[in-house]
Image (spheres, rainbow, N blue to C red):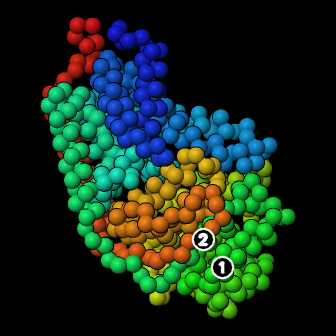
Amino acid sequence: MREAWLPGKRRGALAFGLGAMAALGQAPLGFWWATLAAMAALVWLLSHATDRRGAFLTGWLAGAGYFGLGLSWIIEPFLIDIARHGWMAPFAVLLLAFGLGLFWGAAAVLARFARSPVLGFVTAFVALEWLRGVIFTGFPWAMLGHVWIGTPLDQLAALGGPSMLSLLTLLAAALPVLWHVRGAVAAGCLLVASLGFGLWRLAQPLPDPGALTLRLVQPNAEQSMKWEATLAQEFFNRLLTLTAKGGPADLTIWPETAVPYMLEYSPEVADMVVAVSGGRPVALGIQREEAGRFYNSLRVLEGEGEQTALYDKAHLVPFGEYIPFGDLAYDWFGLRAFAAQAGNTYSAGPGPQVLDLGRFGKVLPLICYEAIFPRDVNAMPERADWMLQITNDAWFGVWTGPFQHFDQARLRAVEQGLPLIRVANTGVTAVVDAHGRVVEELPFGEMAALDTHIPGALPPTPYARWGDGPLALLLAGLALLAMIGRRRVPIDAPPPGV
């Protein structure tokens, strides 16, 4: 049944626009207030939907608007080789936006089964957003709570991860719809209390940084030229020059797939690396082959060129680094992943791993995309002293993607109470302390190196200890309230007086 008080097409356009407005809170803009206002308006719109079909369409279109703008950077990988992949870009945006929008539509439908649809929507939305980060290998990018990253309120992630931030956001938006003036006061109190907790936590002292020097190398190799044979040596020389400049550091770190060669075929590369580092360790991103399989790896070389540590990326990007049934897809249709340069696709490593780097401590390595998964970081087999993310964000363009990716990596530091060292090909290369604050950072899009130290770590946070358990209890309590609460707005009729 079409709502009499607002024609269906206008309602759909309004929902789509509100979703796009909500996306303004994501990096690099960070307009969290726009997200709050847009979600409050969306909750109100959903609370006046007269049937489940209308609720689903409203939620679905709002989600499409949100993801369409928030994930607009998804076109960038298709433009690297525009002649081959450019035609896919608009389809990728539409499929991703309307596909992920289904989670919002499903939350809107599930809310109609509750006696309090507003609380039902809050509960279902946060639960389904968490599920989005898990099913089909997961994609927790642009979670609603990410709008708080870089503000004191992001410290709530130490208690309940990113979903706790999403719950805060949606509750603050929904309470004024549920209880009007009293709800607005309650929402204000919730935000102020969260701000107070964040400020208190940020005021807690951190241990002193370590004495050893790290050199973070940002070669700024343009993705469209990175793998050209005529330029490979030039980009490799950039890495060597920055490593040696001013004398070698205690540990030098290169970004993901920084080396355009493979040690299996060019063993002299290891000698060249340790020659400029004076035999001191260099952690580098490089592809490798073993038994006919190819891996996106982090290798640590030192001394006479021997390898002292190895990590293979475990959480690969679907259709970017591997294609499901990739061998058959290549044999039958000629399809191959965009990122893999060796072989048809990459193989996955065994999973989260902590490397013992001796005097540099124990490090949790994360390669690119792996840093967006809080559950993967929480699954580290033992407590690390710091986290290291190497990445090549040149795939994501220069406007939004790299900065959203960086924000999510920062949140892992808050959740774990561990510092993060991040080294990117074009940026963002930065040092993040155990509270998620940026300590040092290289200019974006410049060839440069940063000499720095490893910030101190905090004891394990509640989220590091218990994961999403506390959040599950909160959602269960909200679900109970939603099922027994008093219905505020009739489901089967337009608002009174319209």
Occupied quadrant, residue 241: bottom right
Q: Is residue 190 left or right of residue 350?
A: left
**For the view shown, which residue lies furthest in the front direction?**
246
Residue type, label 1: Lys
For the point 78% across and 79% down, which residue is it? 266
Occupied quadrant, residue 124: top left
Q: Is residue 321 left or right of residue 50?
A: right
Q: Is residue 179 left or right of residue 225?
A: left
**208 vs 303, nearest the viewer:** 208
Residue 78, given in percent of the width and then of the height, sits at: 69, 45
Q: Which mark is residue 121?
A: none
Q: Which mark is residue 245?
A: 1
For the point 77% across and 84% down, which residue is it? 268
Q: Is residue 1 above or below residue 145?
A: above
Quadrant containing the C terminus is top left
Q: Is residue 204 above or below residue 183?
A: below
The answer to whether residue 366 is seen in the rendering is no
The answer to whether residue 431 is seen in the rendering is yes
Q: Helix, strand or loop at disc 2?
A: strand
Mark 2 is surrounded, within 10 Å at the Cα level, by few (under 14), some (14 to 19) or many (20 or more) other residues, namely many
Question: Real-space Cα distance between discs 2 and 1?
Answer: 9 Å
* Residue that carries the numbered disc 2 in the rendered image: 449
Residue 283, given in percent of the width and then of the height, sits at: 59, 77
For the point 58% across and 46% down, which residue is it? 399
